[in-house]
Image (spheres, helix red, strand yellow):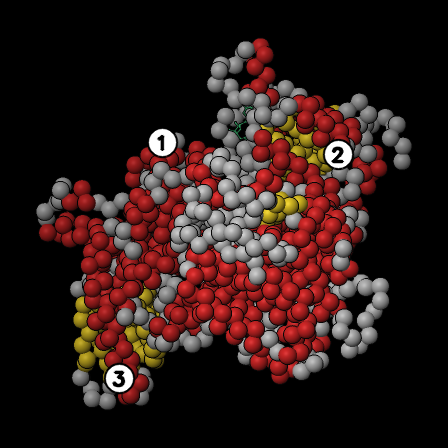
């Protein structure tokens, strides 16, 4: 079951962080992961009180935790999440052996031997026997499943300088100095080639390294290291150059991601080699501008490494891509670590340590500025007041501190000292340092009256960090204290109260307003840039369209994420508490800004009642289940002016502007509708289009629409608006066909032989194209035509007689009917209600009482006279469907005459479904249907499948459409 | 009270530079402040702050210059820097069509969100790259001008902006831009700045805007703007 662990661990890198700086109440697993710096997919399986002792005799009481792949111990409580407190984070694959100790029968103790044989831990459980047993069972299971991960261990440890360091001292001891071993020296960054910044003597690098070698010998190293209080102290005095990179990745936890993904970095580079993106361009521009003062970046070697790491990350997390300042941070990392180490550390930074800092909206940066300000206000109220009074804006200086982790603000050697502590203790360090800077410079800052003064005071302060903090003190020891040391003391002593939980709480407190601000800004900017079409819409409407557009995208993403999480949860079967889910929110840098067809349906269902499913009273309470209809599809296609099968906000706004925009009158509405169905833009809509239009009209009005009739109908009158509209639509079909123009004037007389086709080659083309019909006819040519019965039957309905209507005809037909006129005058436009409160498309009350289950006919029969409306509208749809079906039946009959009987049966059934009450309503349409039934048959000689694009082919296809539509009726 | 007194009055003017990444904002400032040019200028992270005096016949203007980062995602930080600015330099790159579009967006934003009465100059930079076309000074490699003077000028006139084409590299027209801005700053605005700092008065009803990063637009009356 855990065989997919590699995948899971990979997804840490692949996936955008789920909930970034959000945790209003971080779940227990989140806290657990944060405390031990575990990869994203680890969950807390077991925990138990425990005493840990080392072979050196040191022992600690605390808690032991077990996740899928880690055994962790800490003396700190998980709620305060102090990652620096004594303990360990041990990957299960790095455990060689676990033994039950039976020294004293009442005690439950384990002896753990790790990968580094010299490190042995004794864990003495303090708990009831059953819980101890449970823990052990889970541990056993975990050890088994993790066994095969140990192959990665070697790869990892080989790249760790600590191994080399200790092996080196052993080499010396044993007297055989390894010239050959030198080759295997792990990559410890550009510093090896271009020197590490600072004076190694002054940094006392040698003696630091000695102390570390000692520590690592006794307490395990890299993956098996045990934290004792000395560990934190050694880090606070500054890491030695060659161990720095390894310690950064260990304390930040990025080492664990690297452990489980030994090939991810190389794979990424290979996979995306040579590919282009905006980020790649942006990275290229900044390569020569990253820490240019460091010799390694004046050299191609440094540039090449920087490029690779930034590119690989931009591919792995396209949501973040590349943000200026990342170049500086990565450049700094590369001085001390390999590319691969830097790649994983950058991931850990972006995902956990400074979440959202480099995102598309940089919300993390803005959020932490707010947090910082509130901490300044709390801890230095006088200074804060001063800033307020003089209108000095603190973030103008502090923002770059955080964004580039002080690397750009302080001389490099000091910035690295800050990073040492930052990776161990977490983001709170950035705040503590910032507060300490202000505290130390407080007196001077109180003299500053504008942003400029603030900036120059602090610039000056940073430039003199290496000077004595007390140059005039008689005490020599005090004189030796540098200003940087003073800074560290103030930061970690005076501001010791600023803990991880302080930051978490403050972030949670400010998060919403910051996101709101960003979203307002984004909205303002985007709406402003929408161009002239947006001006045609009412401001409030526009604002609502924007909100709705992103709400739909946001909710869809959230739903997807939730489903993913649910699926994962079902698989895991634990950690029932759902994590804070957030995705797609604009403020967080939503990646999706385009709407698929399904999203569009959802969007539409919020602004147009007809775009919702008929099922009003859905059992799960949603009455906004989006409908699907040919009309909606057309709308989508029409609005998709960039032809990428997706809509941008611009597309939607322009689309809506064409319908609802100012100065829209009935004529433009009619033209718009006509053009929607004039697929090839030749100013004609063919028979197929006419039927589709009538279907659309019924679809849009199936829930009623506002009429403006001169004589309001009496209650109970046959001519109730919706019934009237149904009649109007069947009239519409009738009239369209009546006034339609034949597509080939020369063809109208029953002359059997049509003129030869000009281009028979495109007979597989679009069914709506006239040319196809010509082609079709030319194919028909050799077959002797059947004599046509010249009745008064509408010749137009003969599928062999292509016809079309033009815009003037269409207009005339519409204007000839009061209901249709009203529909185009107002009803259609009004059916889009962009601003919810002023909904202008009423849903008839009769509809609300309609039970939704069952077939339309059953339903219609049940609802009785007053409730007929629903059925009427639906039956109206059926009229159109029926018209179409009959036609196609004719075609089919012609193709396969024998099937006639079967078809008729179906037809009977169909009619039978119409309840008695509706029959007379349909009479208008019946007439049409009858006339179709009587119309001449199609040439019998027509072969099946002949001419794909011809009417015959269409007939087969359309049968499907009808079925589809039936389903729609049932829903 | 009267500006006609013997010592030339001196006042500070806050100026913000906006525009697409790498159009040469920082280079223009460097040219104006240090009369220098660097081929590989570091990108601006967040924003940079510099000051420079500008001597006019009647007065001295001390520019407090905020040079912002051009990368798209830094745009949401910009309000923090143009807050209370009395003038703005919106820069585009003469050889890059997209940069004028970006400039237009910035101008629209400033007109709605910045202090009312802000003096805006539209500046097309990197003139040196295209001026060689007629005089055949540059090699064939020189990028072609992508935005004609007429087009940009027409837009500037329509929006009521100052307009210049400059080269930070040669220094052409750089001093002139800043002088023109200095001259265009209304006397009243300078007095408001006076001795006690710029205060909050400028932004109209900006009293409640907390310092610190404020995305809250300074002039709340325009907050519905879209
Ligand atoms: N030929 C020429 N190059 C210029 C000119 N101005 C700037 N450049 C170059 O264009 C590049 C970008 O200049 P910057 O001043 O850093 O641009 P910016 O607008 O500040 O960029 P960001 O800080 O990233 O927003 C540098 O390589 C400059 O040398 C100019 O007038 N002519
Ligand atoms: Mg710059």
- Give the label on residue A133, or none: 3
Rendered location of residue A237, percent (x, y) = 39, 53
Query: What is the secondary structure assignment of the residue under circle 1?
Result: loop
Q: CA distance from mark 3 to mark 1?
A: 59 Å
- Residue A698 seen in this snapshot: no
> Relative to A594, is B120 above or below?
above
* Residue A299: image tag: 1
Disc number lying in front (1 or 2): 2
Q: Position of residue A284 (x, y in %)?
A: 44, 35
Residue A845: quarter of image: bottom right
Residue B193 % position (x, y): 78, 40
Contact (Cβ within 8 Å) of mark 1 with mark 2: no
Q: Quadrant of ligand 1?
A: top right
| Circle on res. B147 | none
Residue at point 65%, 49% (across, down): A740
- What residue is drawn where x is 55% and y is 21%? B144
Please state the horizontal and vertical placement of residue A585, each as a whole percent of the image.
55, 59
* Depth order, front residue of A492/A726: A726
Mark 3 on the same chain as mark 2: no
Residue that label 2 marks: B159
Q: Are marks 3 and 1 in contact (CB under 8 Å)?
A: no
Let me know if residue A937 appears in the view.
yes
Residue at mark 1: chain: A
Q: Nearer the viewer, mark 3 or mark 2?
A: 2
| SS type, badge 3 | helix
- Quarter of the N terminus of chain A within the rendering: bottom left
Q: Nearer the viewer, residue A673 or A539?
A: A673
Q: Residue at x 79, y 39 (%)?
A: B117
- Circle 1 packing at 10 Å, graded few (<14), some (14-19), many (20+), is few
């Amino acid at each position: 079951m855990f065989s997919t662990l590699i995948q899971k661990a990979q997804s840490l890198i692949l996936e955008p962080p789920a909930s970034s700086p959000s945790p209003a109440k971080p779940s227990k697993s989140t806290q657990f992961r944060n405390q031990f710096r575990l990869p994203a997919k680890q969950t807390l399986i077991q925990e138990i009180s425990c005493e840990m002792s080392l072979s050196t005799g040191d022992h600690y009481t605390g808690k032991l935790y077990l996740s899928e792949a880690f055994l962790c111990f800490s003396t700190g409580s998980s709620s305060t999440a102090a990652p620096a407190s004594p303990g360990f984070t041990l990957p299960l694959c790095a455990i060689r052996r676990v033994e039950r100790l039976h020294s004293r029968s009442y005690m439950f103790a384990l002896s753990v031997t790790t990968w580094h044989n010299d490190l042995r831990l004794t864990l003495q459980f303090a708990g009831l026997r059953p819980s101890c047993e449970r823990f052990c069972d889970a541990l056993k299971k975990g050890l088994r499943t993790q066994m095969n991960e140990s192959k990665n261990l070697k790869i990892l440890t080989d790249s760790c300088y600590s191994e080399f360091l200790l092996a080196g001292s052993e080499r010396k001891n044993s007297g055989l100095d390894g010239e050959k071993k030198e080759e295997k020296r792990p990559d410890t960054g550009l510093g090896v080639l271009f020197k590490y910044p600072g004076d190694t003597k002054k940094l006392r690098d040698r003696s630091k390294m000695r102390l570390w070698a000692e520590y690592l010998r006794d307490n395990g190293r890299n993956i098996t290291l045990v934290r004792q209080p000395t560990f934190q102290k050694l880090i606070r005095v500054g890491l030695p150059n060659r161990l720095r990179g390894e310690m950064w990745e260990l304390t930040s936890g990025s080492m664990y991601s690297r452990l489980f993904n030994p090939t991810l970095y190389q794979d990424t580079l290979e996979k995306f080699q040579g590919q282009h993106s905006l980020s790649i361009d942006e990275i290229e521009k900044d390569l020569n501008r990253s820490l240019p003062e460091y010799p390694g970046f004046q050299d191609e070697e440094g540039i090449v490494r920087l490029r690779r790491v930034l590119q690989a990350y931009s591919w792995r997390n396209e949501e973040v891509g590349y943000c200026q300042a990342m170049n500086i941070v990565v450049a700094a990392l590369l001085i001390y670590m390999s590319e691969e180490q830097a790649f994983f550390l950058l991931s850990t930074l972006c995902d956990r340590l400074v979440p959202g800092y480099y995102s598309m909206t940089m919300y993390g940066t803005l959020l932490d500025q707010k947090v910082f300000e509130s901490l300044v206000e709390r801890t230095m109220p006088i200074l804060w007041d001063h800033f307020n009074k003089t209108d000095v804006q603190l973030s103008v200086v502090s923002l770059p501190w955080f964004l580039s982790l002080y690397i750009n603000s302080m001389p490099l050697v000091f910035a690295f000292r800050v990073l040492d502590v930052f990776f161990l203790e977490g983001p709170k360090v950035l705040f503590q340092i910032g507060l300490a800077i202000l505290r130390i410079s407080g007196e001077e800052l109180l003299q500053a009256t504008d942003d400029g003064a603030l900036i120059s005071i602090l610039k000056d302060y940073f430039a003199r960090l290496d000077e004595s903090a007390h140059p005039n003190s008689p005490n020599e020891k005090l004189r030796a204290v540098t200003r940087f040391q003073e800074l560290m003391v103030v930061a970690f002593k005076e501001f010791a109260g600023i803990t991880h939980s302080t930051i978490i709480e403050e972030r949670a407190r400010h998060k919403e307003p910051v996101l709101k601000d960003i979203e307002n800004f984004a909205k303002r900017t985007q709406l402003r840039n929408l161009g002239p079409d947006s001006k045609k819409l009412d401001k409030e409407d526009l604002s609502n369209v924007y909100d709705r557009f992103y709400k739909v995208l946001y909710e869809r993403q959230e739903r997807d994420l939730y489903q993913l999480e649910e699926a994962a949860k079902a698989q895991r079967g634990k950690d029932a508490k759902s994590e804070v889910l957030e995705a797609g929110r604009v403020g967080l840098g939503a990646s999706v800004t385009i709407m698929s067809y399904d999203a569009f349906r959802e969007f539409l269902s919020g602004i147009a009642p007809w775009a919702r499913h008929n099922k009003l009273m859905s059992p799960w309470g949603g009455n906004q289940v989006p409908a699907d209809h040919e009309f909606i599809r057309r709308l989508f296609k029409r609005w998709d002016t960039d032809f990428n099968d997706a809509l941008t906000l611009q597309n939607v706004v322009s689309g809506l502007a064409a319908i609802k925009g100012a100065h829209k009158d009935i004529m433009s509405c009619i033209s718009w509708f006509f053009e929607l169905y004039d697929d090839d833009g030749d100013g004609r809509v063919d028979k197929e289009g006419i039927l589709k239009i009538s279907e659309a009209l019924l679809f849009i009005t199936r829930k009623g629409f506002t009429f403006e009739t001169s004589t309001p109908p009496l209650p109970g009158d046959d001519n109730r608006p919706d019934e009237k509209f149904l009649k109007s639509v069947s009239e519409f079909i009738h009239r369209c066909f009546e006034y339609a123009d034949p597509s080939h004037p020369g063809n109208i007389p029953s002359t059997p032989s049509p003129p030869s086709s000009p281009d028979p080659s495109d007979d597989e083309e679009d069914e709506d194209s006239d040319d196809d019909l010509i082609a079709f006819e030319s194919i028909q040519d050799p077959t002797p035509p059947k004599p046509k019965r010249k009745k008064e039957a509408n010749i137009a309905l003969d599928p062999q007689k292509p016809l079309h209507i033009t815009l003037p005809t269409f207009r005339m037909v519409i204007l000839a009917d009061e209901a249709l006129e009203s529909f185009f005058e107002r009803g259609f436009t009004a059916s889009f209600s962009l601003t919810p409160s002023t909904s202008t498309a009423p849903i008839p009350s009769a509809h609300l009482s309609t039970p939704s289950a069952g077939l339309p006919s059953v339903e219609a029969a049940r609802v009785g006279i007053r409730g007929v409306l629903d059925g009427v509208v639906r039956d109206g749809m059926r009229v159109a469907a029926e018209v179409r079906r009959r036609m196609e039946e004719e075609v089919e009959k012609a193709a396969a005459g024998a099937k006639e009987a079967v078809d008729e049966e179906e037809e009977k059934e169909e009619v039978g479904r119409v309840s008695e009450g509706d029959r007379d309503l349909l009479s208008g349409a019946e007439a049409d249907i009858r006339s179709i039934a009587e119309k001449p048959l199609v040439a019998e000689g027509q072969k099946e499948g002949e001419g794909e694009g011809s009417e015959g082919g269409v007939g087969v296809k359309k049968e499907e459409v009808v079925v589809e539509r039936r389903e729609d009726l049932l829903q | 009270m009267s500006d006609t007194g013997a010592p030339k009055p001196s006042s500070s003017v806050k100026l913000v530079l906006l525009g697409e990444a790498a159009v040469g904002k920082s280079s223009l400032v460097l040219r104006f402040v240090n009369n220098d040019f660097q081929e590989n200028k570091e990108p601006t992270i967040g924003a940079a702050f510099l000051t420079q005096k500008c001597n006019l016949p009647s007065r001295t203007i001390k520019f407090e210059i905020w040079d912002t980062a051009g990368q798209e995602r830094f745009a949401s930080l910009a309000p923090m820097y143009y807050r209370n600015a009395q003038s703005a330099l919106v820069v585009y790159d003469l050889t890059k069509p997209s940069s004028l579009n970006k400039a237009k967006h910035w101008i629209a934003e400033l007109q709605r969100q910045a202090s009312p009465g802000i003096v805006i100059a539209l500046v097309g930079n990197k003139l040196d790259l295209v001026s060689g076309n007629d005089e055949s000074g540059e090699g064939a490699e020189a990028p072609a001008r992508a935005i004609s003077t007429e087009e940009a000028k027409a837009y500037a006139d329509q929006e009521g902006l100052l307009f210049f084409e400059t080269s930070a590299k040669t220094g052409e027209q750089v001093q002139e831009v800043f002088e023109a801005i200095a001259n265009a700053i209304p006397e009243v605005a300078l007095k408001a700045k006076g001795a006690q700092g710029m205060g909050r008065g400028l932004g109209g009803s900006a009293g409640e805007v907390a310092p610190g990063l404020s995305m809250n637009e300074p002039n709340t009356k325009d907050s519905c703007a879209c």
